Amino acid sequence: MNQNPFIPLEKADTVIVAGNCDEEVLSSLRKLRLEIIPTCRCPDVDQSIAYHPDIVIHPVNHNTLVIAPNVFDYYKEVLSGKNIKLIKGERELKVKYPYDIAYNVGRVENFALHRLDSTDEVLKFYLEKEGLEFINVRQGYTKCSMAIIDEGSVITSDIPIYNILREKGIDVLLISPGYIDLEYQDYGFIGGATGNFSKDTVLVSGLFHNHPDGERILNFIKSKNLDIYFLSSKNIVDLGTLITLNCH
């Protein structure tokens, strides 16, 4: 089975996080001794997701990132010397859906889920080299919609994703849509509000103050014998995934 690149092999030492995220989140990440790589703004997509890592970056494996050409030069500079291979994607991101989803691929076990007619061709090539099975879904913001809990478990509010993954033997918790903050939008997604510090610890951007499934979410994560690290005392917010790396 492929190891999920969103889950570090060891405790992460570096994190790519939305460049406009709350200072309390940044302070919490520093307490974990993570080197913070803030995203730059991608001016070519909607302002609500312009700083989101998972819109412009996809980790093919633990040491290879495919990056949208719109912002490639920035990441080439800030990730220089980090022992991470950077590959420039082919599709330029644009403001209108589905022209903003080319790199937002969901991953669990040996599966790569996406709206495949909109996946970047370079990214698709490298995912094929990893031996992944592609699953076509209508939801283009696939990674945003999938919180990776461990190698075989995810949380989502997307019913088609839930049904497909259940058929594939993945342990999936289906939650109500909404209740996750995202500026300029009615709500955000659970996958964008989470990340993985290690195989043992899930990062969550804030607290489930208003989420009707908050207790179910916490119990699901705890049922996997995982710790939960809350990055903020505010309400949970979609940051576009915390992409954690082992660079040092």
Image (cartoon, rainbow, N blue to C red):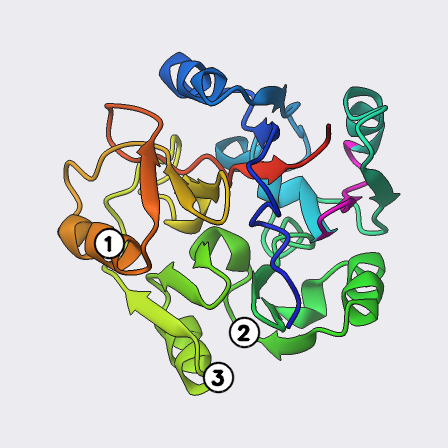
Mark 2 burial class by Cα count in 10 Å: few <14, some 14-19, many 20+ = some
Identified at 77% across, 42% down, the residue is 67
Looking at marks 3 and 2 on the same chain, the residue that comes earlier in the sequence is marked by 2
Identified at 44% across, 82% down, the residue is 169
The tag on residue 137 is 2
What secondary structure is found at the residue carrying circle 3? loop
Q: Single out the mark in the foreground, 3 or 2.
A: 3
Identify the image quadrant of residue 53. Answer: top right
* Residue 23 picture location, percent across and down: 41, 13
The tag on residue 168 is 3
Tell me whether circle 3 and circle 2 mark residues in contact (CB < 8 Å): no
Quadrant (top left/top right/bottom left/bottom right) for the C terminus: top right
Q: Which residue type does callout 1 highlight?
A: Ile
Q: Single out the mark in the foreground, 1 or 2.
A: 1
Vertically, is 218 above or below 208?
Answer: below
Quadrant (top left/top right/bottom left/bottom right) for the N terminus: bottom right
Identified at 66% across, 23% down, the residue is 40
Q: Which residue type does callout 2 highlight?
A: Val
Q: Which residue is mark 1?
A: 217
**Magenta stretch, residue numbers:** 61-71
